[in-house]
Amino acid sequence: MADEGESIPTSEEKRTEKREEKKTEKIERPRPTHLLQWMEMTVSEPEKRTVASMKMQDTFIVYLVETRVTDPSMRGYGEGATSVWRRYSEFELLRNYLDATFPAVVVPPLPEKKASYTWQNASTDKFDPDFVERRRAALEIFLLRVAAHPKLCQDKIFAGFLKEENGWKESVYATDFQSKAESRLKALNAAFRLKKPDRRFEELKNYSNELQNNIANILKIRTHLCDKLYGIHKVHANYARVFHEWSLIEKDISQPLQSAGHYMDVYASSVDAALEEEEQYADQLKEYYAFGDSLRSVCRRYECAQYDLERGEDTLSTKAVQRDLLRAIINGTELPASAQGKSGNAFSLSGMKTKLFGGDTPEQRDVKLKQLEEQIAQTEIELRQTTDETQVFVEAALRDIDRFKRQKVKDLREIFTNYAVMQIKQCKKGIAIWTSAKDCFSKM
């Protein structure tokens, strides 16, 4: 029995408490910021296909892109799981679209089309199974990076790439994303004609060049080392051949020599798996080499935006001078200092008067002045808008660049640490082989 001082809650109060509890639960639950928090994504089963067209055969590799929703409360990406086949060219189309649509984002790069920085015995055939498998892994990393990005992962075209087999390419081209891409000529012109470049983007451009130079040097050193290591290990097979021949004439030590020869063969062949394992670390470094191009792409877009801003400022300044000249000529007053600076070297007052008016009447001159003032007002509006857009771009770009740098440090630490671990493992394997060979020699 309840105490007399306690009141029994009514049904309405209970419902209110439940609503408050649910509200608290909703507030406490963190909101997903990217797809990988509630979706699994893989690229698998590379398959070689050939399609005949125009009396020619087109041979290519397709990859199975699969997704699985792990949080049933998240909807909009299919019923639980999706799977579509994609060519490399479709991955390329997706990246070109993202690069044009998100100018302030350091868009993840795609793996290389053709193998680079390869050692002498590595295959350069794009249909080589090992190369195809490494490309598959790199394409999966590309999708995972896009899915982990807070902006890119929300794009509808990216969502369609994951689940729409038919009609996806048409939907990409329907966005007219090509028109958003800055022309190379404009980017080159902007880079050389900027009057007030942002020091941060200049430093970033230089950094991207240095990043690529350092990674390129590491890949070149690795290529030379692979060539040397491969040769050194394979020469050990000569030990095996000599020990075997020697064992044929030495009855007392025949068995130890044959066993030692076997271990020399094992040592000679151990380099193949080691160098193949090294390729995955080289591919990861190549990704960050390509990231250098992504960084420069953001810098070029900043330069184009800043160039547009500076051109707007120049246009406004020119129109303002023309307005001041018109007013001075109409009113018969002395030219303002700004107009004198503009006119002193290029033209005289009488020449400007003739150029502006010719045989215009005072009424026509007033009309021209009014038109010029309207143009100035419109230019000021456009300039404010351009200034705001440029500022928004700069802030967004710097945030994403900072995000990229944090991820870069984490990834490079993991790449080099794992590479060192692999080298230690290979050295231990070599020590174990030579220890076994030593045991054979000690039995002589």
Image (cartoon, helix red, strand yellow):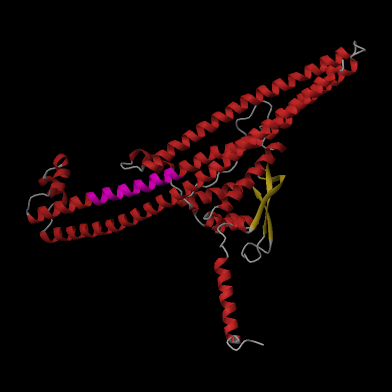
Q: What range of the chain is rendered magenta?
A: 298-317
Would you say residue 114 is visible in this rendering? no
Residue 312 falls within the magenta-colored stretch: yes
Single out the residue that lies furthest toward the bottom. Answer: 4
Residue 73 % position (x, y): 63, 66
* Front residue of this view, candidates 126 and 194: 194
User: Which residue reaches farthest right?
Assistant: 251
Residue 288, percent across and down? 55, 39
Does residue 330 sit above or below 253 in this rendering?
below
Q: Is residue 198 left or right of residue 357?
A: right
Q: Position of residue 37 (x, y in %)?
A: 61, 57
Q: Quadrant of the C terminus?
A: top right
In reply to whether residue 286 is colored magenta, the answer given is no
Residue at left offset 22%, top offset 49%: 318
Up-down: is 384 above or below 96? below
The residue lying furthest to the top in this view is 249
- In the image shown, does 127 or 386 lie closer to the viewer? 386
Locate the N terminus by quadrant: bottom right
- Residue at point 37%, 52% (across, down): 391
Residue at horizontal 58%, vertical 65%? 29
